[in-house]
Image (cartoon, rainbow, N blue to C red):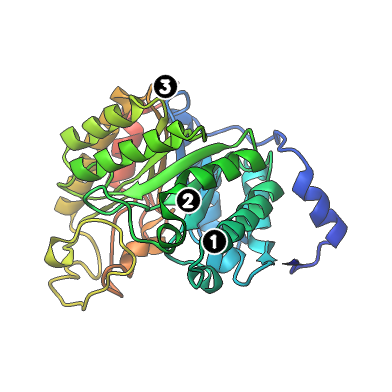
Amino acid sequence: MKIYFIGLLPILLLLSSCVEPKTEVATAPVPKNSLKAAYKGSFHIGAAINDGQINQTDKQAVEILEKEFNSITPENIMKSMYLQPAKDSFYFEMADKFVALGEKNNQFIVGHALVWHSQLAAWIGEITEATAMESALTGHINTIVGRYKGRIDAWDVVNEALNEDGSLRESVFLKAMGDSYLPKVFALAAAADPEVELYYNDYNMCRPLKRQGAVELVKKIKASGARIDGVGCQAHWSLTNPTLEEIENSILAYDSLGVKVMFTEMDITVIPNPWDLDGANVDQNFEGSPYMNPYPESLPDSVQTQLAQRYEDIFKLFLKHEDKISRVTFWGVNDGQSWLNNWPIKNRTQYPLLFDRQFQPKKAYHSVLNLKKVKG
């Protein structure tokens, strides 16, 4: 097995960090009216972070990350194509930095994602035989989860295993191993780190058919004797969809399974999607047009207000069920970082998050903060 270390730290220091338990780090006082202070006691407020933030070269984003958020998730660097691009060859430099950053800031650290059909290492995608696939997944999970045992707080173990009708996606894992791969990988992750939280994560989890499929998936994993601790609902939403009723029904459905509920990839689009596209299938791409990019320079104040109201309505619902929700994570720190600028149409100007491209808080930020503003 090849494990590559890139950087200036000695190999022995890096190896010792693999087993060092996570410790509390003294930090500066939390600003009273930051998001993480306001929602303390309700649920974690998280952000997905990119390479510039992990390397701490994006200084403005890092400042906001430290001030506002108490949970982090890596956008890309822990997906298999980056972490294990070839069999028995692991690249841990960026993942090590990510974990160290979360420890430095006393943040709840989420690993994303162990088993996913997209952004998959090419060598895994070529496997067709059950024993070989099980061996590949075992090596991948044991090495990665074991390396960060006691340091990462939670893992998205399986990402996007369902079709829109709730049936299982015909992924390379399903084709090779059948549906037994699902309880197997949860059991592997639990064995590699018995204390870490284990989640299933997917988009459109508020739609009735997919919601029912997710409910059955969780039941199947539990019935096998494997452990699953939470369900992550990717909140790639719009100004109108899903409805608050659909969101609430989903919170109640997943909570009834005895697992934690979280909203893991939150962003709200304010510009059109082609053919009323709804979801987060990264394989979908479409041609652009002026109609599809209506606000290339700035977002009209009227739309800013709509976005702020939408966030306020959603967070009111989250607070109503704060006893069931453990985390809300935004998929990015500011609008300029958002993946939606290039999906499902490239080179558009999107405005889905709480901070604008100049790292200034938007009306939407204040609408979320003011629901729980710290007094005094």
Asked if residue 265 can be seen in this view, the reply is no
Residue placed under numbered mark 1 in the picture: 133
Which of pointers 3 and 1 lies earlier in the amino acid sequence? 1
Question: Which amino acid type is marked by label 3?
Answer: Lys
Q: Which mark is residue 375?
A: 3
Q: Residue at x 51, y 32 (%)?
A: 225
Nearer to the camera, 293 or 75: 75
Question: Which amino acid type is marked by label 1?
Answer: Met
Question: Which amino acid type is marked by label 2?
Answer: Tyr
Asked if residue 343 can be seen in this view, the reply is yes
* CA–CA distance in space, label 2 to label 1: 9 Å
Q: Residue at x 68, y 61 (%)?
A: 92
Q: Nearer the viewer, mark 3 or mark 1?
A: 1
Side of 238 where 55 appears, left or right = right
Percent from the top left, x then y, of residue 205?
28, 44
Q: Of helix, strand and loop, which one carries label 3? A: loop
Which of the image's four quarters has the C terminus? Answer: top left
Disc 3 crowd, CA 10 A, few/some/many (<14, 14-19, 20+): few
* CA–CA distance in space, label 3 to label 1: 54 Å
Q: Quadrant of residue 326?
A: top left
Side of 199 where 301 appears, left or right = left
Q: Of helix, strand and loop, which one carries label 2? A: helix
* CA–CA distance in space, label 2 to label 3: 49 Å
Percent from the top left, x then y, of residue 303?
17, 53
Residue placed under numbered mark 2 in the picture: 181
Which of pointers 2 and 3 lies earlier in the amino acid sequence? 2
